[in-house]
């Protein structure tokens, strides 16, 4: 296969979520000395962007997004160390976790894959993340954006507890805060003082990029 054939096939197989084939094509590309960033930026990311676009149009649903995301995640496992070696710049650092009291992570994991596919470095703290753990992780990793995820209505008040913890630690103005999850609304995000909200993984990526651009535009050169 030519490099063009590999890129075309990688795009198509990611789109349909054929994880074994995506990994095989990634290996084939590397075997013929294709650059890892070429595989990422010319096939994998455009394919995941198309997945997001189809989801927004109603042509794809969550299961299709998940299998495409997982297919890409497998390729990313292979490419990540190579990309680090080549010094490919990430567009920003995103710290993510499901709030204390909540163990749901399917939505969060999908968002992580989409963010990574869009060029973010993602630090996932997992589930049941207490406010003090978010604070410690922000101190350690210095992320651009922090994401709080909640699936249960009963755990949504943890957003405010987390915001209070950031305020108390003097970190609130250092990071962009995004919130999301099935029961969350824009109104609720506004009420707890978050900077951004998104209803799904595709929108999260767009919103994260725009919030980061806005923040960087305000920083004097």
Image: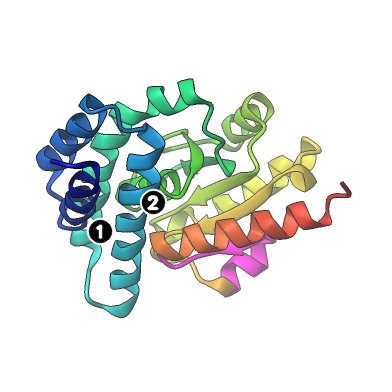
Coloring applied to the structure: rainbow
On whether residue 133 falls in the magenta region, the answer is no
On whether residue 190 falls in the magenta region, the answer is yes
Viewer-nearest residue: 196 or 153 = 196
Name the spot of residue 164 as percent of width and height, x first: 71, 47
Q: Are marks 2 and 1 in contact (CB under 8 Å)?
A: yes
Name the spot of residue 218 as percent of width and height, x first: 83, 56
Which residue does the image show at 57% across and 56% down from the upper left? Answer: 208
Query: Which numbered disc, 2 or 1, marks the residue that appears first in the sequence?
Result: 1
Viewer-nearest residue: 178 or 99 = 178
Q: Residues within 10 Å of mark 1 (few under 14, many from 20)?
A: many
Residue 211 image-quadrant placement: bottom right
Residue found farthest to the right: 220
Residue 94 in the figure: left or right of residue 166: left
Magenta range is: 187-200
The numbered disc on residue 114 is 2
Q: CA distance from mark 2 to mark 1?
A: 9 Å
Q: Residues within 10 Å of mark 2 (few under 14, many from 20)?
A: many
Residue holding disc 1:
65
Name the spot of residue 75 as percent of width and height, x first: 26, 36
Say above or below: 99 vs 185. Answer: above
Circle 2 SS class: helix
Mark yes or no: residue 205 visible.
yes
Mark yes or no: residue 104 visible.
no
């Amino acid at each position: 296969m030519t490099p063009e054939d590999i890129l075309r096939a990688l795009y198509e197989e990611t789109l349909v979520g054929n994880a074994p084939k995506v990994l095989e094509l990634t290996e084939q590309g590397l075997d013929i000395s294709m650059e890892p960033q070429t595989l990422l930026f010319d096939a994998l990311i455009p394919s995941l962007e198309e997945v997001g676009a189809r989801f927004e149009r109603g042509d794809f649903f969550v299961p299709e997004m998940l299998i495409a995301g997982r297919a890409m995640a497998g390729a990313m496992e292979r490419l990540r160390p190579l990309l680090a070696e080549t010094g490919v710049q990430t567009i920003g650092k995103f710290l993510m976790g499901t709030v204390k009291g909540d163990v749901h992570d399917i939505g969060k994991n999908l968002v992580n894959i989409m963010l990574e596919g869009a060029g973010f470095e993602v630090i996932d703290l997992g589930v049941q993340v207490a406010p003090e753990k978010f604070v410690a992780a922000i101190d350690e990793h210095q992320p651009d954006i922090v994401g709080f995820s909640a699936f249960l209505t009963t755990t949504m008040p943890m957003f405010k507890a987390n915001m209070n913890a950031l305020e108390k630690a003097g970190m609130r103005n250092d990071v962009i805060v995004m919130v999301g999850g099935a029961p969350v609304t824009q109104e609720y995000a506004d009420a707890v003082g978050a900077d951004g909200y998104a209803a799904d993984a595709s929108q999260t990526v767009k919103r994260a990029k725009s919030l980061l651009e806005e923040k960087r535009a305000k920083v004097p050169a």
